């Protein structure tokens, strides 16, 4: 482009615009001339506050400030649209330029308009005149008659709540609520505006209290409520007067004694309170010294022992003044009554065996004391052999006492015999009391718990077995043994009820015993397999054998639903070392495996008494499968056993069945 031509076009444009402005943008032309004027800038450039100097105010005072906005050309825009702010409203607040002084301190006041703020004016607030009282420290820990644990502290403040440190006002305290008597220094002069009380106390009934504080020319203050608790015990008082019935009997209304403070509150004392007879004679029975609970002592077991008549009681506790009860009327006591337990008495014995002594409890079911107990006579039924019973008092002759009965059964044939023991004692209305004693002599008996078919049994978890109990006496006569009870050595494995019925609980082996006081107990062995999995077992059903017996052990595998493919099992019996060398209580006779569907092979290691048996089935064996038949001969008396174990147990699909397999052990007892 030609630069000269461009300049020419620009000049022409300016000339055209000037012409348009001179003609007012329309026709009609004229010879008047117009001048182009730039727009005016009225934006806020600064804001001035008056007064601008720092200002000091007393708390509660008000000061008015003005603010004016100016343009860049110093043209005043007035005060319209100006907002005010304080740097600390708690010290001095501002609204519409009016500043209110509050708490002691300094605050900066600023004015703002259009995003422009004035310079700050510092307002310093000082304490105002005293206007009110306020509780700085609340009273607490009050017990009747004692100085508060926490004494109140009161401040003199101005209207805004500032502490007036120059105040020396006299502050008075009085009870605000709750009643009672306030003691201590009730007027305290403030120091630095703070009145600190000391030695204040309240005497009165327990409950809630408050204090009111006043001073001349200022508003009063009231404390928060606080509890007044009981003070230290100063006196004893009878809360409930005792009411007696008969001598030697517990009072129908027991005496209740309180430890009280000077205001009559039950003190929180635990000190012992002691009672004695003040008048009327006799003695006291039961507890005569009782420890107070929360200041209250109740004599619930107290008796007056002696003749009928009036009594008074005196109660004391440490250094507290004693207190005496009202008159207590005691009536004559009913006579003593001899009470025996058990009655009648039964002694059971086995012929030829001395029975244990039987103790009879002798007590007084009456009221008057039962003393000087004695056996006056013993008589026997016509069929009884004479003098088989001895009766003596083993623990003194005043009730409660123990009468010991000892029977002699030597030369006495089985039967039931009866004796009458006549007892007497002082204090009874009836001259004597008779105790009937039965002696039951039983023939020698034998208990057999279980049979040779179930002395050793496999019982599944949750299944039950009743081995049966047969008791026989001389001549083979069957007779019950009423003393039999049943017990499981490990109830975690199997339990037994009162009839001898056994229930499997968890995997393991345990003995179940039928116990008898006749020293003829018997036992069975219970094997409880796991709830699932194979069981390696034998058909041995008893554990008692004699020297020379042949023991046949049929080693069996109960697959319990599994399909068995292969097995490696061991049969072992103990080897012992003694003075004569290494020996075993049983000797191996032979091992037979031909009847087993698992076609097992076996090897015998006589040095450690182990038979290792390997068998298998390509089609899988199920049910109860015979593995081998092993025979032993008993060589010595003592305790031995046959132990079955497995080192391999595979399913036909090669599943490892060993972790859930139960192995078994069979004790052999040779008398």
Image: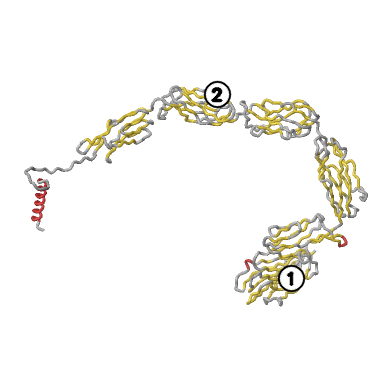
Percent position of residue 499, x then y: 76, 58
Q: Earlier in the sequence, mark 1 or mark 2?
A: 2
Dot 1: element: strand
Q: Quadrant of residue 537?
A: bottom right
Taking 308 as reference, is 416 above or below it?
A: below
Residue at the disc numbered 2:
183
**Outermost residue toward the right in this view:** 382
* 398 sits left or right of 167 in the view: right
The vertical placement of 446 against 326, above or below, is below
Q: Quadrant of the N terminus?
A: bottom left
- How many marks are shown on the rendered structure? 2
Quarter of the image holding residue 551? bottom right
Query: Is residue 31 at all visible to an observer of this figure?
Result: yes
The residues tagged by marks 1 and 2 sit, at their Cα atoms, a distance apart of: 101 Å
Residue 43 picture location, percent across and down: 23, 40
How packed mark 1 is, by other alpha carbons closer than 10 Å (few <14, some 14-19, many 20 or more), is some
Query: Position of 373 compared to 2: left or right?
Result: right
Percent of width and height locating residue 88: 36, 35
Q: How is the image coloured?
A: secondary structure
Neighbours of disc 2 within 10 Å: few (<14), some (14-19), many (20+): some
Farthest-out residue, left: 31
Q: Nearer the viewer, mark 1 or mark 2?
A: 2
Label 2: state its secondary structure.
strand
Residue 553 is marked as 1
Q: Answer whether residue 576 is visible to the viewer in this image.
A: no
Residue at 11% x, 43% y: name it. 35
Q: Position of residue 69 (x, y in %)?
A: 25, 36
């Amino acid at each position: 482009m030609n630069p000269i031509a461009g300049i020419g076009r620009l000049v022409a444009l300016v000339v055209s615009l000037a012409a348009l402005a001179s003609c007012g943008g329309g026709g009609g032309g004229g010879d008047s001339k117009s001048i182009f004027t730039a727009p005016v800038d009225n934006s806020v450039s600064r804001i001035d506050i008056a007064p601008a100097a720092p200002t000091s105010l007393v708390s509660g005072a008000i000061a008015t400030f003005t603010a004016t906005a100016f343009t860049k050309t110093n043209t005043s825009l007035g005060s319209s649209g100006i907002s005010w702010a304080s740097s600390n409203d708690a010290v001095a607040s501002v609204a519409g330029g009016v500043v209110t002084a509050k708490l002691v301190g300094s605050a900066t006041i600023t004015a703002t308009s259009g995003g422009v703020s004035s310079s700050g004016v510092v307002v310093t607030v000082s304490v105002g005149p005293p206007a009110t009282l306020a509780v700085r420290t609340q009273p607490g820990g009050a017990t009747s008659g004692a100085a508060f644990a926490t004494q109140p502290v009161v401040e003199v403040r101005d209207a805004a709540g500032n502490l007036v440190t120059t105040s020396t006002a006299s502050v008075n305290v009085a009870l605000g609520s709750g009643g009672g008597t306030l003691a201590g220094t009730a007027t305290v002069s403030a120091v630095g505006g703070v009145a600190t009380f000391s030695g204040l106390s309240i005497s009165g009934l327990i409950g809630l209290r408050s204090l009111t504080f006043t001073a001349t020319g200022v508003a009063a203050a009231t404390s928060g409520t606080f509890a007044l608790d009981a003070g230290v015990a100063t006196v004893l008082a009878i809360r409930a007067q005792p009411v007696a019935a008969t001598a030697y009997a517990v009072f129908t209304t027991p005496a209740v004694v309180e430890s009280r403070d000077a205001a009559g509150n039950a003190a929180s004392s635990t000190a012992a309170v002691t009672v004695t007879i003040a008048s009327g004679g006799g003695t006291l029975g039961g507890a005569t010294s009782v420890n107070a609970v929360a200041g209250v002592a109740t004599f619930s077991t107290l008796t007056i022992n002696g003749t009928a008549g009036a009594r008074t009681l005196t109660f004391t506790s440490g250094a507290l003044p004693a207190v005496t009860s009202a008159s207590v009327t005691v009536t004559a006591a009913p006579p003593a009554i001899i009470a025996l337990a058990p009655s009648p008495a039964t002694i059971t014995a086995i012929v030829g065996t001395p029975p244990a002594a039987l103790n009879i409890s002798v007590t007084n079911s009456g009221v008057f004391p039962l003393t000087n107990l004695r056996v006056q006579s013993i008589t026997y039924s016509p069929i009884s052999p004479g003098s088989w019973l001895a009766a003596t008092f083993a623990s003194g002759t005043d009730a409660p006492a123990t009468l010991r009965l000892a029977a002699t059964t030597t030369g006495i044939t089985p039967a039931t015999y009866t004796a009458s023991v006549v007892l007497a004692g002082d204090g009874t209305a009836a001259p004597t009391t008779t105790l009937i004693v039965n002696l039951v002599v039983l023939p020698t008996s034998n208990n057999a718990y279980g049979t040779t078919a179930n002395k050793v049994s496999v019982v599944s978890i949750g299944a039950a077995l009743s081995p049966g109990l047969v008791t026989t006496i001389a001549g083979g006569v069957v007779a019950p043994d009423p003393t039999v009870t049943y017990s499981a050595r490990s109830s975690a494995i199997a339990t037994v009820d009162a009839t001898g019925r056994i229930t499997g609980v968890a995997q393991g082996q345990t003995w179940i015993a039928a116990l008898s006081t006749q020293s003829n107990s018997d036992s069975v062995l219970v094997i409880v397999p796991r709830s699932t999995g194979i069981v390696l077992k034998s058909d041995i059903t008893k554990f008692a054998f004699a020297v020379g017996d042949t023991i046949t052990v049929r080693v069996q595998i109960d697959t319990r639903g599994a399909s068995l493919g292969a097995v490696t099992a061991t049969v072992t019996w103990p080897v012992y070392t003694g003075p004569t060398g290494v020996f075993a209580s049983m000797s191996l006779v032979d091992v037979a495996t031909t009847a087993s569907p698992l076609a097992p092979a076996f090897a015998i290691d006589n040095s450690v008494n182990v038979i290792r048996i390997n068998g298998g089935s390509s089609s899988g064996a199920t049910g109860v499968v015979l593995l081998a038949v092993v025979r032993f001969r008993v060589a010595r008396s003592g305790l031995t056993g046959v132990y079955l174990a497995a080192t391999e147990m595979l399913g036909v699909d090669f599943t490892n069945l060993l972790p859930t397999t139960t192995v078994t052990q069979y004790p052999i007892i040779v008398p």
